[in-house]
Image (spheres, grey):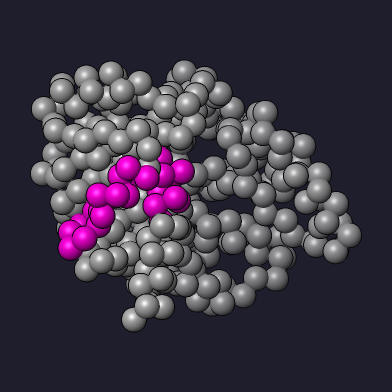
Amino acid sequence: MILAALMWFKQNGIRLVVFENGVGGRADPSNILNPIIACLTEMTLDHQDLLGPTLEDIVADKAAIVKQTTQKLILGSANADVRRLVRDHVANTTIVALTEEYTISGYNDRLNYRSEYHNVAEQPLHTTALFQKQNAGTALAALEALMAYNVPIHWERALNALSHVQIPCRYEKRTFRDGLVLIDGAHNPYEMETLMKAMALDKFIPDRVVLSLTTGRSSLDMLKPLSQLNASFDVIASPFKERRMPKAEIHQAFTDLGLSWTYYDHLDLFLQTSPFKKQQTLITGSLYLAGVLRTYIIDADRKLHIKT
């Protein structure tokens, strides 16, 4: 797919290409590229079966996207340990780091961004989540880096475009069946903790949590951040057998945390319960589950509007 994309870009005279890595950097197919500008967002313990067991292993793998040709690295991590580890692996590239060369803040759905080049106040976003504001700030820092290399970017148009960005399954809210559904594909303990912080600031209190738990991470660590919620829990088994967390391990985690829960072997069995009615629901734990239920909600809502 990478080669097909590169051929298409060349045939159509595309001068600027933005590639997103799949998993890590060292073995990702996009590693054949020699970027002028590289971006690293927040890093945590995830995909350890592929990237290594420690945070240092993961940082080293992802930092491999930085090549001798790379002039600037936009480092969008709020974790001081991650920034230190990146600097250990990146020696000859200028690093533009969050909390150092640029900062972000803001309440509700507004973003404040400050750097050497711009001071943006009260930028509207389609999210209230701090981690999405962090990513938005990293995107703005990347645009500034491109502008420094004379790439013709209209800053005000970029800000206007940012105000319209909606990212599916990343702190996405949808009204459905007289209820409110929050969809976030947090799939590691750090992302789950970050999600809980965003919900607390947003004062979103779910009555029901729908999630899937997959191998490669601890069920207990995934559930700990959610254990403070006074909600019912529905666990839906992953359709991919090699990714399915053993039911016994999930049971032990819920038992250790003193939480009651309901288990569904198949998504269809869960949907037969007519979920989401007149309540606040959180869908999380798996991007796959988040995407499937998002599609279900959109399709069901569309059919309802057609009938009425």
Q: Is residue 208 above or below residue 43?
A: below
Asked whether residue 272 is drawn in magenta, I would say yes
Q: Is residue 239 above or below residue 194?
A: above
Q: Residue at x 62, y 47 (%)?
A: 20
- Residue at the (58%, 33%) spot, across then down: 24
Task: Write down the region rendered in magenta.
Answer: 268-294
Instruction: List x then y, in percent, for residue 230.
Output: 10, 44
Residue at the image point whose x is 36% and y is 50% from the top: 184
Magenta segment includes 211: no
* Image coordinates for residue 195, horizontal then vertical, percent: 30, 46
The single residue placed furthest to the bottom in the displayed view is 308
Give the camera-side residue of 207 and 248: 248
Question: Left of 261 or right of it: where is 212?
Answer: right
Regarding residue 278, the answer to whether it shows in the image is: yes
Question: Which quarter of the rendered picture does the C terminus lie within?
Answer: bottom left
- Place of residue 285 in the rendered image (x, y in percent of width and height, measured from the top left): 35, 39
Q: Position of residue 211 (x, y in %)?
A: 31, 40
Q: Left or right of 230: which side holds 181?
A: right
Task: Name the quadrant containing residue 113.
Answer: bottom left
Which residue is found at the position 89% from the left and 60% from the top?
11
The image quarter in which residue 296 lies: bottom left
